[in-house]
Structures are given as structure tokens and as C-alpha cells.
Amino acid sequence: MDITEQDAKFRVTIDVFSGRPNPTWEMTSEEAKRLLAMFRAVSSSKADLVSRATPPGLGYRGIVVTRLKGDETVPEETRVFNSILSIRKAGSISYHEDNAKIQEFFLSQAKAKGHAALIEKMSATQRPSAR
């Protein structure tokens, strides 16, 4: 992926609730720089990952990272679910294996930002699987 270092800003959302607000936070500039470096390590797109990338209608539906600031080299939105990245950039979506461990990065952030109990409460079927 062609991602340049810049002053990008991101909002992270754990997409888990229906009918009430999902846990959300903005990344620090250091966290954003680390994320951009992780994006550069992501493997090439694979069309056969689409079925594994589709979350259920209820329960844990992944971690959504939304670009708040940054140019077109930075994905508009990335959903991490089932160790698959669904990356929306320039109006199209590509699917990638999470070989950079972005999901784990966000789960550790969630715990550090006070959402450890939520992560622990997710059932085995809802909990993000680390591969």
C-alpha cells in the first residue's frame, strides 16, 4: 500500500452495540503514525476474503477506523473483522489479511482506553480472533 507519513487523524469505533453508542476514541498522532506504518505492511488484496470479512447483523461487527484528516493516500475507512481488513479508499473496497496485526493493535488500545471489560465480556463467538 502506498501510504505516506503525514499529519493524519483517525477515529476508532468498536462496532458492537445496537441501540446505544459504540465505544469510540480518536488516535493520538503517535498512534496514527504507527497505524500508517502497519498499513504499509498489509499484504496485497485478495477477493476470496470477502465472505470472511462480512460481520453478522448483531453483536461484535469489528473495529472501524475512520479517517478524519489526511489526503487520498490514507484509507477513508477500514473495518477489521475476523482478522480481515476491508479498506475503503477512493470509493472502492479491497480485502486484505491482517498480517500486520492491526486488529490486535486496536484491541490493546481499547483496553488501555478503559474498554477492557467490554472486550472480556464479548462471547467466544463475538470476540475477535487473533490469528
Image (cartoon, rainbow, N blue to C red):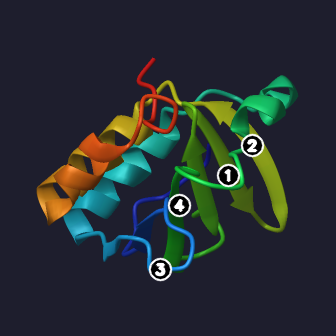
Q: Calculate the distance from the C-alpha at mark 4 to the C-alpha at mark 1.
A: 10 Å
Q: Is mark 4 on a helix, strand or loop?
A: strand
- How many numbered tags mark residues here? 4
Q: What element carries label 1?
A: strand
Q: Calculate the distance from the C-alpha at mark 1 to the C-alpha at mark 3.
A: 25 Å
Are the residues flagged by discs 2 and 4 in contact, CB closer than 8 Å?
no
Are the residues flagged by discs 4 and 1 in contact, CB closer than 8 Å?
no
Q: Position of residue 38 (x, y in %)?
A: 41, 41
Q: Calculate the distance from the C-alpha at mark 1 to the C-alpha at mark 2.
A: 13 Å
Tell me which corner region of the image, top left, top right, bottom left or bottom right, holds residue 81: top right
Return the disc, 1 or 3, that comes first in the chain's sequence: 3
74 to the left or right of 49: left
Q: Identify the disc placed on residue 87.
A: 1
Viewer-side label of 4, 1:
4
At x 75% / y 32%, what residue is drawn?
Answer: 45
Q: Which residue does the numbered mark 3 point to in the structure image?
A: 20
Viewer-side label of 2, 4:
2
Q: Which residue does the numbered mark 2 point to in the structure image?
A: 54
Viewer-side label of 1, 3:
3
At x 43% / y 36%, what residue is drawn?
Answer: 127
